[in-house]
Image (spheres, rainbow, N blue to C red):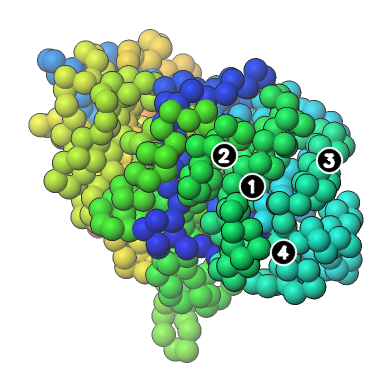
């Protein structure tokens, strides 16, 4: 898991890292509020070297990673005054109706953040406010938050954990000149003290590697009472000094020990297993910490005595069950500002198969059911490289230019998988820093309304009080036919991925995917979250229907076109808003400095030019004849399912425009941020 982790990822092993339900009797954490009715899983970390305030959750996430992510956000200002229509019996309304975005939850359960926050000011600025929305805030490595920053983060609700490898320490951690470990003399002092007592180690003077130990390491002898007492005291002292809430043990128990170390243990302690000795140590540590401090394990569900271990720890976690940074395809592409670059794509674990997600998850869920621990799931991301529309010449050959963005496909796939199983996940951006921040973790799905998920031929779906999640079982596109009996009357489906009303077909279905990664040409499975949006937006100041002859100037307030036919151009001036639904505009649409724009199911002849909009811009399902220019907008841009007969130019928008998973059809050239559409 991060800079100080000890292992390689054995995740392709079908018995590597399962997760758990949160339906067990969880130990109460008096100073942190948990979401109820969720079921969750666990993570591993040691082998690789990865290096409640008043701000709204969506504002926090958008401001954080705008430079590296494309969060297509449509805010409440860009809403229609028309009621949210619904078919009889709760069928979802068509996407031509704009409704209020469902509110996000105030808090999320779990985050695994990169240690880079302590060395890179840009990363720190990105994460600092985002962290405040999470209850359990985990990282790896020895650096910690301090002073007023720690006070502020904990006051917001974060629990933090000092890091310790449960099994031992690397030989390199004794070296004061080591570029990383030398920064933490207090930790090195502990290891030097242990090293000075060879009877406290299983392999004194003989550092060994294997399994979870990537490099030569020394391993603790948990049968030695003097060692246990020293280690307990060292952890308590460090928690007192740091002000942290608990300790995280990477690779808890003996499952990741090198086989030769296990063999040696069994030789010298034939009557007591390593994991039994580990449980005894944890019991002593729990007694010393009391109930107010936390113990976070890593993949304790793997242990044969997991139920005994769970009586002493509070949290457990898995890694890489849904997505991860290894095993994905590799290729060479031209990256903007970097030239030809060898890249890796995020690996998506499929639902089915011996090494599929469903198979993986059953083990941890069965082990943890009814146990007094909370389980989480950590996935990993690579950056996703999207074409910029520019080209470069390499060895005489013209090639497309790509730029790194967030892999939101992976974020949503992992989130949907975990939600189906009732688990709180987080997709870590250790390998694409500041590209993992997303509002999806604050989604308020509510309680499940069925005992389990529905497994259909090509998709898996689970319904909740406030919406449903769905994943595809393959890499082809899927047609989701929502169960109308599950959807409240009058509700409109809100597509969280697109941050816009779902594009609902005439028969009530929603088409998803396929997801094609242009950099590699590979197809991925899909994961989506749909919420039930209720009620119309605030009333329009002016509503136009029927025919309007001549040009229309919107100079203030919110003007709505509802089935209107404007025989002339429409101009939206600074500070004003336009909501057009199922209308026609015969003279083009121009907006400069507008507050917001939502145009859905509308025919526009004469082109579109939208610049410097302060709030959200959403153009969905429109037919546009003429050049389309979208530039320098600051509130999020969604261009989804449009047919544009002309060129498309996007530039300077922050964040970059998104198609929300519903591609636009552009007959002319597409340039800039919309290049390749």
- Of 38 and 7, nearer the camera is 7
Q: Secondary structure at mark 1?
A: helix
In the displayed structure image, the side of residue 329 where residue 90 appears, left or right: left
Q: Quadrant of the C terminus?
A: bottom left
Image quadrant in which the N terminus is located: bottom right
Q: CA distance from mark 4 to mark 1?
A: 14 Å
User: 35 above or below 418?
Assistant: above
Which numbered mark, 2 or 4, is in the foreground of this view? 4
Position of 116 compared to 444: left or right?
right
Residue closest to the far bottom: 395
Circle nearer the N terminus (4, 1): 4
Q: Secondary structure at mark 3?
A: helix
At label 3, counting other C-alpha atoms closer than 10 Å, the crowd grade (few under 14, some 14-19, many 20 or more) is some
Q: Residue at x 32, y 23 (%)?
A: 448
Residue named by callout 4: 202
Residue tagged 1: 278
Q: Earlier in the sequence, mark 3 or mark 4?
A: 4
Residue 468 visible from this viewpoint: yes
Q: Name the residue rendered at 25%, 53% in the picture.
A: 352
Q: Is residue 277 above or below residue 50?
A: above
Instruction: Check whether the beta carbons of the residues at disc 1 and disc 2 lie within 8 A of each other.
Output: yes
Q: Which residue is mark 3?
A: 233
> In this view of the protein, which residue sits in the foreground, 441 or 595?
441
At which x and y percent is residue 410?
A: 41, 51
User: Mark 2–mark 3 contact, CB under 8 Å?
Assistant: no
């Amino acid at each position: 898991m991060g800079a100080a982790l000890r292992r390689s990822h054995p995740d392709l092993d079908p018995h590597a890292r399962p997760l758990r339900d949160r339906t067990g009797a969880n130990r109460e954490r008096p100073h942190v509020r948990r979401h109820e009715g969720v079921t969750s899983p666990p993570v591993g970390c040691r082998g690789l070297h990865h290096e409640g305030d008043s701000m709204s959750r969506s504002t926090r996430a958008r401001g954080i990673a705008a430079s590296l992510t494309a969060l297509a956000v449509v805010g409440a200002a860009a809403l229609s005054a028309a009621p949210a229509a619904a078919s009889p019996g709760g069928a979802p309304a068509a996407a031509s109706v704009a409704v209020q975005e469902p509110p996000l939850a105030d808090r999320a359960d779990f985050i695994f953040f990169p240690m880079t926050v302590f060395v890179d000011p840009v990363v720190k600025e990105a994460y600092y406010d985002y962290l405040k929305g999470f209850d359990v805030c985990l990282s790896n490595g020895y650096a910690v938050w301090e002073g007023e920053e720690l006070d502020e983060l904990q006051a917001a609700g974060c629990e933090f954990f000092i890091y310790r490898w449960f099994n031992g320490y690397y030989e390199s951690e004794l070296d004061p000149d080591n570029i990383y470990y030398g920064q933490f003399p207090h930790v090195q002092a502990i290891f030097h003290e242990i090293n000075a007592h060879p009877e406290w180690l299983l392999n004194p003077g003989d550092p060994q590697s294997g399994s979870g130990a990537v490099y030569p390491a020394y391993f603790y002898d948990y049968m030695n009472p003097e060692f246990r007492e020293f280690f307990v005291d060292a952890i308590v002292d460090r928690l007192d000094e740091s002000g942290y809430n608990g300790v995280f043990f990477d690779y808890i128990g003996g499952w990741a020990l090198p086989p030769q170390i296990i063999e040696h243990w069994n030789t010298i302690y034939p009557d007591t297993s390593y994991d039994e000795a580990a449980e005894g140590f944890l019991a002593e540590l729990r007694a010393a910490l009391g109930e107010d401090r936390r113990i976070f394990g890593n993949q304790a569900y793997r242990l044969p005595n997991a139920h005994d271990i769970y009586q002493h720890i509070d949290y457990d976690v898995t890694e890489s069950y849904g997505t991860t940074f290894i095993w994905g395809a590799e290729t060479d592409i031209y990256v903007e500002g970097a030239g030809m670059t060898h890249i890796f794509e995020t690996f998506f674990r499929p639902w089915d198969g011996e090494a599929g997600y469903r198979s993986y998850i059953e083990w941890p869920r069965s082990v943890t059911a009814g146990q007094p621990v909370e389980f989480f799931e950590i996935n990993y991301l690579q950056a996703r490289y999207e074409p910029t529309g520019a080209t470069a010449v390499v060895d005489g050959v013209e090639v497309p230019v790509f730029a790194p963005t967030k892999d939101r496909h992976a974020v949503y796939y992992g989130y949907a998988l975990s939600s189906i199983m009732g688990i709180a996940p987080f997709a870590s951006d250790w390998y694409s820093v500041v590209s993992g921040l997303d509002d999806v973790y604050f989604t308020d799905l509510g309680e499940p309304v069925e005992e389990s998920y529905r497994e259909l031929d090509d998709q898996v779906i689970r319904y909740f009080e406030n919406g449903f999640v769905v994943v595809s079982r393959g890499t082809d596109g899927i047609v989701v036919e929502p169960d109308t009996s599950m959807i409240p009357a009058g509700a409109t489906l809100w597509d969280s991925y697109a941050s816009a009303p779902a594009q609902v077909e005439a028969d009530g279905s929603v088409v998803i995917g396929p997801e094609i990664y242009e950099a590699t040409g590979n197809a991925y499975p899909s994961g989506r979250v749909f919420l039930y949006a209720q009620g119309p937006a605030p009333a329009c100041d002016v509503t136009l229907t029927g025919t309007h002859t001549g040009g229309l100037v919107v100079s203030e307030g919110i003007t709505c076109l509802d089935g209107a036919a404007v025989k002339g151009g429409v101009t939206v001036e600074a500070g004003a808003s336009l909501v057009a639904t199922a209308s026609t505009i015969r003279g083009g649409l121009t907006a400069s400095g507008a507050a917001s724009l939502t145009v859905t199911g509308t025919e526009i002849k004469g082109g579109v030019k939208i610049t410097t909009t302060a709030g959200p811009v959403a153009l969905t399902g429109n037919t546009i004849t003429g050049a389309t220019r979208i530039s320098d907008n600051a509130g999020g841009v969604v261009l989804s399912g449009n047919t544009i007969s002309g060129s498309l130019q996007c530039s300077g928008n922050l964040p970059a425009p998104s198609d929300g998973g519903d591609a636009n059809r552009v007959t002319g050239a597409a340039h800039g941020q919309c290049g390749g559409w």
